Image (spheres, grey):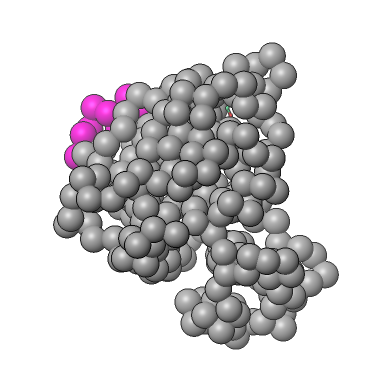
Amino acid sequence: MTDTATAPFDKNVNNAATHPKYLSVWNVEAFYGESYIVQGVSFDIHEGEILALLGRNGAGKTSTLRTIARLDSPALASGEIWLDHQPLHTMRSHQAAAAGIALVPEDRRVIPGLTVEENLQLAQIAPPVGWSLERVYQLFPRLGERRKQEGVTLSGGEQQMLAIARALCRDIKVLLLDEPYEGLAPVIVQEIARTLEIIRDQGITTVIVEQNAVAALKLADRAVILDIGKVVFDGSAREVLENETLRAQYLAI
Ligand SMILES: Nc1ncnc2c1ncn2[C@@H]1O[C@H](COP(=O)(O)OP(=O)(O)OP(=O)(O)O)[C@@H](O)[C@H]1O
């Protein structure tokens, strides 16, 4: 672990200059069968940043996250992915998970028949274990209150919190969030955003894919925009919020 691992991220500091690259995606190409979907995607993220990965429907956002997590599909054909000096591109998904990648998929995958606490305990069954249950419940008091409730009976927002909490129960370096705000009321979106800021301040690096681009941009430090499998913008989140042409062209907002 580097000595910057526990340093809180300060938006006012030029982190690009002071922090080393942490997750590097370089010229990644990935296919579903014959379909060429991730078409030479490159971006870097510094430790402790939140990066919003945006773009229209079908731009390749989920596919890029799945490729970083080293799921079998889409298949990585070329390019490199490095996490804190570890070559993710040579790994299978379980190895990438052990290296510190946690993907929270759009459907949240709360396990039926298990309570909130059992869902969390299951994540801690094998090392490397991350946050303790006490620490998780401190961050998500709603989950603490409902620890004995079956996970799938939680509200959508609470299930999203459980999915994020479960990722933190493992010792992770990078959280990949696929549409965490989907179907949630604005007040719950704000609650989850505040939690993600706290998680960032505790040293975890996050990539967020989100249709609610404005909410993601307000949370994120940086933004990468994809269009038809290629990067068309890489810069600060504020720049996208302030650039009407860019938003209209690639995000339709
Ligand atoms: N399993 C699959 N097999 C074949 N093609 C797929 C598969 N999954 C996705 N695709 C295609 O890959 C392209 C990119 O999909 P992806 O889900 O990565 O986009 P996205 O930017 O996340 O879109 P959305 O915002 O709609 O979720 C789309 O054209 C989609 O139809």
**Residue 7 seen in the figure:** yes
> For residue 244: magenta?
yes
Is residue 252 visible in the rendered image? The answer is no
Residue at horizontal 31%, vertical 32%?
234
Question: Quick check: 120 above or below 111?
Answer: below
Quadrant containing ligand 1 reads top right
Coordinates of residue 117 in the picture (x, y in percent): 69, 78
Image position, residue 8 (x, y; %): 30, 66
User: Residue at the spot x=60%, y=16% of the render?
Assistant: 36
| Secondary structure, magenta segment, majority class | helix
Q: What residue appears at the point 57 percent right and 39 percent down from the top-left corner?
A: 88
Q: Nearer the viewer, residue 8 or 251?
A: 8
* 82 to 40, vertically: above or below: below
Identify the magenta region: 241-250
In front of the other: 81 or 212: 81
- The C terminus lies in which quarter of the figure? top left
Q: Position of residue 113 (x, y in %)?
A: 82, 70
Q: Above or below — where is 24 with respect to 195?
A: above
Residue 124 placement (x, y as % from top left): 68, 70
Q: How many marks?
A: 0
Apparent side of residue 227 relative to residue 237 in the rendered image (left or right): right
Q: Residue at x 62, y 69 (%)?
A: 129
- Quarter containing the N terminus: bottom left
Q: Quadrant of residue 159?
A: bottom right
Does residue 66 appear left or right of residue 46 in this picture? right
Q: Is residue 136 magenta?
A: no
**Quadrant in the rendering for residue 154:** bottom right
